[in-house]
Amino acid sequence: MFQVGCWGVLFWHLPHPVSSPSSASMEDGTVSHASPAEILERISAQLGCSPASAELAVHLDGTDELGHLRGLFHMPKTTDLSPTDPGLVHGTEDCVYLAGNSLGLQPKKTKEYLDVELDKWAKTGVHGHTEGSRPWVCAENTIEEMMAHLVGAMVEEVALMNGLTVNLHLLLLSFYKPTARRHKILIEDKAFPSDYYAVQSQIRLRGYEPQHSLLLIRPREGEDTLRTEDILTTIEKEGDSIAVILFSAVQYYTGQLFDMAAIATAGQEKGCLVGFDCAHAVGNVPLRLHDWGVDFACWCSYKYVNSGAGGLAGAFIHEKHSGSVRPALWGWWGHDLKSRFLMDNEMQLIPGVGGYRLSNQPILLVCSLQASLEIFSQTSMQALRKKSVLLTGYLEYLLKRNFGHEDADPHKAHVRIMTPSDPAQRGCQLSLCFSVPVTNIFRELERRAVACDMREPDVLRVAPVPLYNSFRDVHRFVCILREALAVSHGHPQGALL
Ligand SMILES: *Cc1c(COP(=O)(O)O)cnc(C)c1O
């Protein structure tokens, strides 16, 4: 189980001649708890190459037990990306896709599943509701179990429906019940705009003012990310007036992974309800929403869960609330399936989150989500996390080694990593700040077929996704970044170290 503060569950064994980075087997009994940097240095020493060499990346890919999963996705080619300058790339090789935090890649099965349902519709029309392997009347039910597994929930605790912001509103309508004494919502400062707007408008909807009822928690002066101790202290101090604590699980801008279990416990001890927006966490880090006692959660599925833009979103309500918390808004899809079509207008509400469904499901979105969830089912979040810690650790290692120092050389650009360096406090994304304007760097990266993203005001977000990114991708990124820095900085940056 993944625990914040104890990331070192990266078991490592050293068979001969060179260790395998993703092997969980420890039959030789030699287990070590090494940091990614130590592992990378050890393996490159064994190989007799520099940790900066492509040889190390090739070796790590060769021993990556999840490497075959990349082949299950469509990887865009360099020349298919419009900003690419054909003179700066080699032929039609794969681009360097590090934007899975924004939009996950398309599973190859997606189209096949969509075609099945389009054909069924074309050939049988309304009969599709009840026929085939994916009857439309209960299509989402066939994939909820896989999604529940991904977020560490029981299947009855999860519903797939709507979009993320819609689900956040539906959940807040039930969970945010302000009173004169307890009317605040605590969120992190610089929360994702949609979450911020949702919370603001919910406060107004209940007749309160965000000015008094919205509590923002900021990092300390001069720091980029929040300290868990500060979050817990705020909850302890302000908890009596807080109705709902709503945090992101992984912060979209900084990449910080919050200690959800600790926040949930601290909040509930003060009588608050605790929810998480898991948009940047689901499919990225192992989640145990049930065991952590999280009251409610929501997420989208088009980032690390690869369901395509606007894909079917998720909602979670802990089983402990299934008898007590009811949806404020009803629709026929929240009615028990057994009697839903009696059309007697006698609501038989499904207990828990199932009762929050309003409309019949968009079957085409179910197809694309299914294609991706089936890939997750071929592995586990633990295996993905293990690779992820090393893959992102590798990126961090190369960045720090090459661009990390504000050394005496004024000709060298430098990169600061805003994301916590403790792997327990981050997922796969690193957020980077530069000593030169980020827009220039971003443009130069795009011309060289790197897909990553820039977020205002000054951050470049880079996400090596363990499901389909390789160590070679990370190595190529760092080489291209060196060129981009040289161009933006107007000075060569020297060889990669
Ligand atoms: C991506 C993201 C959203 C987007 O919301 P939609 O309703 O899916 O458009 C909202 N909140 C967070 C934290 C996100 O990361």
Image (cartoon, rainbow, N blue to C red):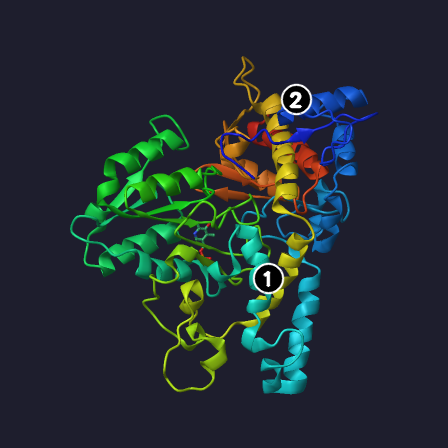
**Residue drawn at point x = 78 percent, y = 32 percent:** 59
141 and 309: which is toward the camera:
141
Find disc 2 in the rendering and name its residue.
38
Q: Position of residue 270 (x, y in %)?
A: 28, 41
Q: In the rendered structure, find residue 247 and report the number of the disc placed on it.
A: none
Q: Which quadrant of the figure has residue 123?
A: bottom right
Q: Which comes sooner in the sequence, label 2 or label 1?
A: 2
Tell me the kind of residue under disc 2.
Glu
Q: Mark 1 falls on what kind of element?
A: helix
> How many residues crowd around disc 1 within 10 Å: few (fewer than 14), some, or many (20 or more)?
many
> Which quadrant, please, contains the N terminus?
top right
* One can see residue 37 in this view: yes
Q: Mark 2 falls on what kind of element?
A: helix
* Callout 2: CB less than 8 Å from ligand 1: no
75 and 264: which is toward the camera:
264
Q: Position of residue 48 (x, y in %)?
A: 80, 20
Tell me the kind of residue under disc 1.
Leu
Outermost residue, right side? 17
Q: Position of residue 31 (x, y in %)?
A: 69, 26
Find disc 1 in the rendering and name its residue.
369
Q: Which quadrant of the figure has residue 317?
A: bottom left
> How many residues crowd around disc 2 within 10 Å: few (fewer than 14), some, or many (20 or more)?
few
- In this rendering, the answer to whether 300 lies above or below 333 is above
